[in-house]
Amino acid sequence: MMLKKFIRNASVYMLVLSMAVSGTALAGCGQKQSETEESSVELIDPVGSTETYATVERRDMKTYTQLNGKVVPTVYEYSFPTDQNFSTYANLPGNTVSKGDALVNASTEKLDEEVKSVKESISALKESYNEDMEEYNERLAVAKAAEKYWGDIAKNIEGWTEEEIAAYNKTAGEYDTGSCIYNYVKAVAERENLEQDIKERTDNYELDLAHYNTRLNRLAINREDVVVSSKIDGKVVGIRFFDMNEWVSRDVPVAAVGDFTDMVVKTDYIITSDVKRAIEVFGFSNGKRYEVEFVEPEANATITSVADAKSTFRISDPAGELKAGDYVLILIVNRQSLDTLTVPNEALNKDDEGPFVYVKSGEGNVKRQVKTGIKAGMYTEILTGLSEGEQVLADIKSTDQTKTATLTKGSVSTDFSATGYLFYSNQQYVRNPIEWGTAYVKEVNVKRNQRVEKGQVIATIWVTADDLSIRRKERTILRANEDLQELIKGGEEKNKRQIKAKREYIAELNKQVSEMKSDAAKTEIVAPYDGIITDVRNFEEGDILLKNAWVAIISKEDNCYVVVEDKSGQLTCGNEADISYKDGSGQSVVSKGSVVTVSSWALSDELKNDYTLIQVSSEDLKRMAESNIGADGWWTRTSFSVKASVREVNDVVLVPKSAVTVVDGITYVTVEENGVKTVKSFIAGGSDSTNYWVIEGLSEGTKICLE
């Protein structure tokens, strides 16, 4: 895969605006020099001339640094607070999220097992409690009946005289008055003890239940550690790629969310001190200049590689003209001398006393020592020794080429091309949903790489219900309802806690019976959402489908992408791409896609990767998936040709490369105005294979000479 490399830290010296050589010195168009030459531009002498002169003129001299930049949202990265095992992505690049929305989920297998264990303990606790209560209530009913029986007798005895008591005891045998009163006291004690036992049993039950509920609450709190959530409203712009159950270290970024209400420009790296010492800093994009502010790195920030490091600028864009993905060139003016005297470099000589020039004097030339300042391209600043308008000897040659062109505005961009593949993220197993009974496979109804809609049949099944278990639970519910009615008759306020526990128990049993009957009625396994089937298991009709066994794997439609390798981070969210391929019928198709991951320029080292995700429409995704039908594995996948325009600049003045001469990084053209041809510099922001584009120095409609 061929990737075009960005130009990094292009520092040049530039002569800006109105840099004209006098008409007597230059009679024609400038000859184009190689961009890599270090020597000065050589212009051809007029025919028959032995000495040529240049006028000492005032010009603005500047040196500057250019930084290539991209408009990106402010990015916030998130990580797990504790070590975890990766499970699923809750939201992926291109998804809009709100504050608090989940981004990445860790495996909850251990938590789920513990939750299941606690819930089973709660269910067993309730069942044991209800069984004990049934026994206690039966014994209590007997005790209360005995208490009433012996109580009535004791109460009757209390009204007897001693003679009546003596007469009764003579014939009572075993159950004399003393025995009757004893049995009454014993019955009261039995009833009180049972009530105390019931209270203690209920208290212990409620303590145990509270303990289990506390454990459930703690497990729910622990679940916060297995979910990485966004702390802002925004859009997911980056993820770390994980395999199922892959180990994830704490505090390592796993996802990034971009705030598209807070845009910044990421550029090639520049040292803070260079920006602070700069005379002027501004941005340029699509023919317009923008004010910018440098964002200083954090004090504890470390730079491991200058080549990979990036700088940040905030850009003033009150009209909201810039959008994510736009190319911005940052210009940092390092030095400048405005309205200063200059001469062509060819006029300067040097001896033991320093630089000097030959100044025209009458019919001859006079040597004069000078003090120089900034040297930029074809010209050097003169600090002392010359006056404006003087003529200095300069070995400048010129030509009289007549081919010209008028400058117009247009667009310039760099092409990005790569091979792409379908990338299925956030895949989910479509499993056997039957909890009760035995499921058998009739038919699997989908194929690999098939697009399905939510509710579409993945497989047809039949289920044999566990009728015995259903009848047993229904009998248990019947007895529990009878017990509930007895408790209510015994006093709702008095038996409040027991009634509450009994109702919860009955509700749980009813739920289980409902689930068992529902499972028995199921005949289909369906797609949980719109998506692409990425894998299917092979079954024969009549095969037993084990509990929780998977039938197919599906990836959400909005989480399927075309993925391309982009090591230099040329693509970023906001860029558009053309994706060429052949569909399932062999027809050539070109689809449009949107880049949904932010450039690696905007990410930390931990979250950077070499791949960019491109999102396409549902219709295009369907065609792309169909082109892969039959593909099984990495090497049989269908590839796509992906092309995009990057570093695109619109509405800028374009200068044909054939008209441009480059000297020491300075770009020049020969301008013709009112029949006079002069060499003029301009600040070029960049170029494509045909044209340079202009930041300063040339305007639309200017007439220039061509080579």
Image: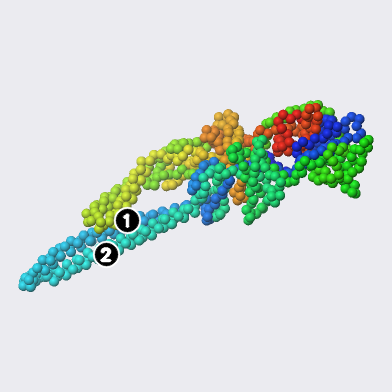
Q: Earlier in the sequence, mark 1 or mark 2?
A: 1
Q: Residue at x 66, y 45 (%)?
A: 267
Residue closest to the eye, 567 or 46 = 46
The quadrant of the picture occupied by the C terminus is: top right
Label 1: which secondary element? helix
Crowdedness near tag 2: few (<14), some (14–19) or many (≥20) residues, C-alpha within 10 Å: few
Q: Position of residue 455 (x, y in %)?
A: 43, 37
Q: Residue at x 69, y 50 (%)?
A: 276
Q: Amino acid at mark 2?
A: Gln
The answer to whether residue 522 is visible is: yes
Q: Position of residue 320 (x, y in %)?
A: 58, 38
Q: Which residue is labeled 1 in the image?
A: 127
Q: Position of residue 603 (x, y in %)?
A: 60, 47
| Left or right side of 183 for 576 | right
Q: Which residue is labeled 2 in the image?
A: 196
Crowdedness near tag 1: few (<14), some (14–19) or many (≥20) residues, C-alpha within 10 Å: some
Q: Position of residue 421 (x, y in %)?
A: 59, 39
Label 2: which secondary element? helix
The answer to whether residue 426 is visible is: no
Colour treatment of the image: rainbow
